[in-house]
Amino acid sequence: MISKEKQTPLKWKSLKTLYKILVPILLWIVVIPGAILSCFSSREGSDSRIICISITLIALILIVTLALMNRRAEKRYGYRAYENQFIKKNDFKTALPLFVMLLIVVLPFYVLIVTSLKSTIEANNIAFTWWPTQGIDLNSYKELFTYGQVIGVTMGEAIINSFIYAIIPTAVGLMVSALSAYAFAKLEFKGRNVMYQILIMTMMMPGCVTMTTAYIMYDKLEWTNSPLPLVVPGCFGAATTVMFLREYFMGIPDAMLEAARIDGAGKWKCFFEIVLPLGKPALIAQLILGFVSAYNDFIAPLIYLNEPQRYTIQVALDFLNGAIPDQTLIASAGVFSLAPMLLLYVVFQKRIISGISMSSGLKG
Amino acid sequence: MDNCGKRRKKTKDEFTSALAAMGPLVGFALFGLVPLVLATVVSLTELHSTNLSEMEFVGLENYKTILTNGDNRTYASYLSTLVYTLNVPICIALSLFIANLLNRIKLGQRFFRSAFFIPYVCSTVVIGQTFRVLYQQESGVFNAILSFLGFQKVGWLTESPFSFMASTIIMVVWQGLGFCIVLFQAALANVDESYYEAARIDGASKFQIFWKITWPAISPTTGYLITMKVIWALQAMTETYILVGPNAIVPTWGGSDAYVSDLVVKHIYNMAFMSPYQYGYGLAAAAGWILAIIVFIITRINMKSQKRWVNYDF
């Protein structure tokens, strides 16, 4: 059979090489640094800035031209010089809404970070600017550790408070919950089912009822000026965690524990040497999720902490906002308080996401 | 099942096992049950300080006050909460749409999912403060975008009760999407591909495929999300608390003195702790119980109705 396809002219073939070399170079070495430089260069209207912008624009135009030529080549000869894996494999119509969504998700973070980098004068200016036109000013980040007169605590101290109040109840509570989950999953004792039913029922208790009277109780215990109301209740574990871990521990084969038992291991040895190591993924997921939610908690610290030295970062942020009308300082405090969580998320992303879908108790 | 104790000394062994299981229950008895009983007792009295000896027994008066002749603020707080709860269906519909798209793209799925999930690990305080800046009338980003597109600037948080609530809902949906997307994506990935193939061979339309296969197959997830998110939404307070911020102008419902931003839990908080409206712990506890009962009833209705449309056999 004779192929009906027109032969691809050499002109188009050489496009491929051009594309493969030129586009990445232009994109990564010229366009992106150029864009960043022209955004952040110190003075508006200076020569270097104009040069930066024009070079970036020329490079962008080149890339667009190449892309258009590429498209034409494909239309005419069914020959594509350069293929982007993302575009090749994905349907454009499907990907577009996702990109829009991505922009929407990123926008507040972008504004937060950019505001924190602006100088105080610019950030509090009425007109909004998309980048620090007066140059990057990191002074507000320094102030996080030095400026604490108005609210009585610096952000650096507050974040340490936050860590302490979050990590103790999460870690201790997780161990207690794990022990309880092991007992409910693998040990036999009288009233096990009744106790488990009661535990499930405790989850239904809404926090809105106890919010006010818990304060009275802690006041009677003289705990209201200390972090104890935040730390101690959490140390007893949580019913949701028990439920989730029990489900997970049930999946550990009985034969394994039986074998250990024959070798002379007691039930506690079974727990520490078989169940805990095998349950590690679930435990780590719960630890991180528990830590994140304890760190981000706002209402309980707001109610119980009265001394400024004990404020957690969330409460300190709220008070800072009320005390100082300086947007840069507030924004950099926000970035500062988000940073540990984002770092945690980047490192443990897989565990957090699988932990979320596991703890909903749905398959999958 | 009885694997760790074939030759056990029965009673002692059982006792230690039960003790191990007790942890969370003891915690609940100490820090959950005591305030719960206290709330029940206090809700029947009038109390203006943490000194319990000042309690004056008034019977069901507090409940009656709230239900029959409560002031504007009480009713308005329920109205606000009701409007706020609208974020649940919006969030679920949008996240289902996005999860569906995510499952259809072949490259970059995990990248998008990870990006959308970021707001979940961020604190509501920072997100609220950031959004408040975004919503500002003169210097806010949203208004900058609007005026760039040629629209008039909008007072997102100050113009009217509904603009305030819409702004709140936008923020809450933005924050809650990641959680729903992750669950929906897991559910969608679990649907057996052969159902879709069979349907396609039979010539079913896209809409039919979604409605007859996808929707029932993911209904347990949808049901779970609706139940949980409604419970959370009814007891929310931080979101509006932060969005209002310090001494900002908050719209009021219909010209009354009731702030839109006061959701029920915020109203309870005000009653107990905020000095200008100190109605006392008695009323606050009663209001707490009433909200708890409402949450319970709504959850009940939710579960009952889900028996009809949630399908566990897929």
Image (cartoon, coloured by chain):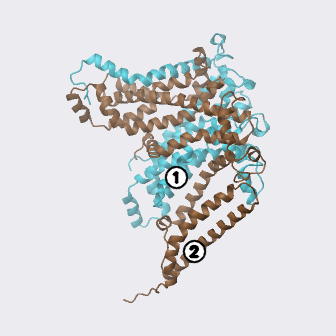
Chain colours: A brown, B cyan
Residue at 57% x, 45% y is B119
Q: Is residue A360 left or right of residue B121?
A: left
Q: Which element type, helix, strand or loop, lies under badge 2?
A: helix
Q: Position of residue A89 (x, y in %)?
A: 46, 66
The subunit letter for the residue under badge 2 reads A
Residue occupied by mark 1: B96
Where is residue B261, by image quadrant? top right
Give the residue furthest to the bottom. Answer: A2
Residue occupied by mark 2: A66
Residue at 49% x, 39% y is B303
Give the residue furthest to the front. Answer: A48
Q: Is residue B225 left or right of residue B252?
A: left
| Residue toward you, B38 or A100 | A100
| Residue toward you, B165 or B120 | B120
Q: Quadrant of the N terminus of chain B?
A: top left
Q: Is residue A23 left or right of residue A362?
A: right
Kindly report the distance in space between the C-alpha atoms of the residues bearing marks 2 and 1. 37 Å
Q: Which element type, helix, strand or loop, lies under badge 1?
A: helix
Vertical placement of residue A224 versus B250, above or below: above
* Amino acid tagged 2: Leu
Vertical placement of residue A266 versus B214, above or below: above
The subunit letter for the residue under badge 1 reads B
